[in-house]
Amino acid sequence: MNQIIHFIVDTIGSFGYPGIFIMMFLESSFFPFPSEVVMIPAGYLAYKNEMNISLALLSGALGSLAGAIFNYILAIYFGRAFLLKFGKYFFFTEKTMTKMENFFTKHGEISTFLGRLIPGIRQYISLPAGLARMNLVRFSIYTTIGALIWITILAWFGYYVGVWFGDDLSISNLLEMLSSKADSSVLKDKLHYIVLGTLGFVVVIAIIYVLIYKAKHKKRNNKA
């Protein structure tokens, strides 16, 4: 973990906004790690007037989108062939793939949007979207909206770290506090509440979507 921390500190410190883009590209593609360790320090640096928070958010959103499109393209060109050849070893059949593709055809937008807000899923939601050949423009729009909401939450959390702790905290110390295994870590406790609140938002939006979808489906059947 210390090596990752130093790598992030060096990348953002050396490259600034392009560094944020690079780290969020990696986070969103083939080298998944928590986006918290990128955007929270960016928000803290904005508090210290060492970064512009709008440019940090733009860099993070573009990096997330680029990484997501990278996974999307990988899934299109290699995913289906790989799963058809080796999926049987993981109980993943062609029938399962067809169901997944049909699901994304109907619900790809909301799945992509909400998936960007769920830890452990946001990095991989691009893969089924690519397998289902979801419209790239729509995929990009919903990916960007979801990613922007999440990184904005993290960046403003980082900004308020400055309000709580002042501007004497180093980025290395901040990242160590976020990664600390101590149960009493104040920052980790606050971050957990933020994650839970975001998941609650996802659940509410998902319920509303299902209710609207069922109502439209019922109305369509009544007309038939």
Image (tube, grey):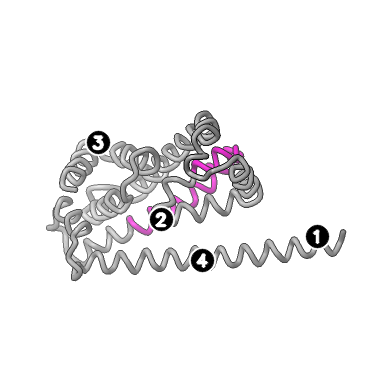
Q: Is residue 168 left or right of residue 208?
A: left
Q: Quadrant of residue 179?
A: bottom left
The residue under label 2 is 150
The residue under label 3 is 15
* Mark positioned earlier in the residue sequence (4 or 3): 3
Circles 2, 4 touching at the beta carbon (< 8 Å): no
Cα separation, mark 1 vs mark 2, equals 35 Å
For residue 48, above or below residue 6: below
Q: Quadrant of the C terminus?
A: bottom right
The residue under label 4 is 203
Q: Amino acid at mark 1?
A: Arg
Point out the frontmost of discs 4 and 3: 4
Callout 1 secondary element: helix
The residue under label 1 is 220
* Mark positioned earlier in the residue sequence (2 or 3): 3
The magenta region covers 126-154
Percent across and percent down for residue 46 are 27, 52
Q: Amino acid at mark 4?
A: Val
Percent across and percent down for residue 123 are 41, 46
Cα separation, mark 1 vs mark 4, equals 26 Å
Cα separation, mark 2 vs mark 3, equals 22 Å
Q: Amino acid at mark 3?
A: Phe
Callout 4 secondary element: helix
Q: Residues within 10 Å of mark 1 (few under 14, many from 20)?
A: few
Q: Is residue 191 magenta?
A: no
Cα separation, mark 1 vs mark 3, equals 54 Å
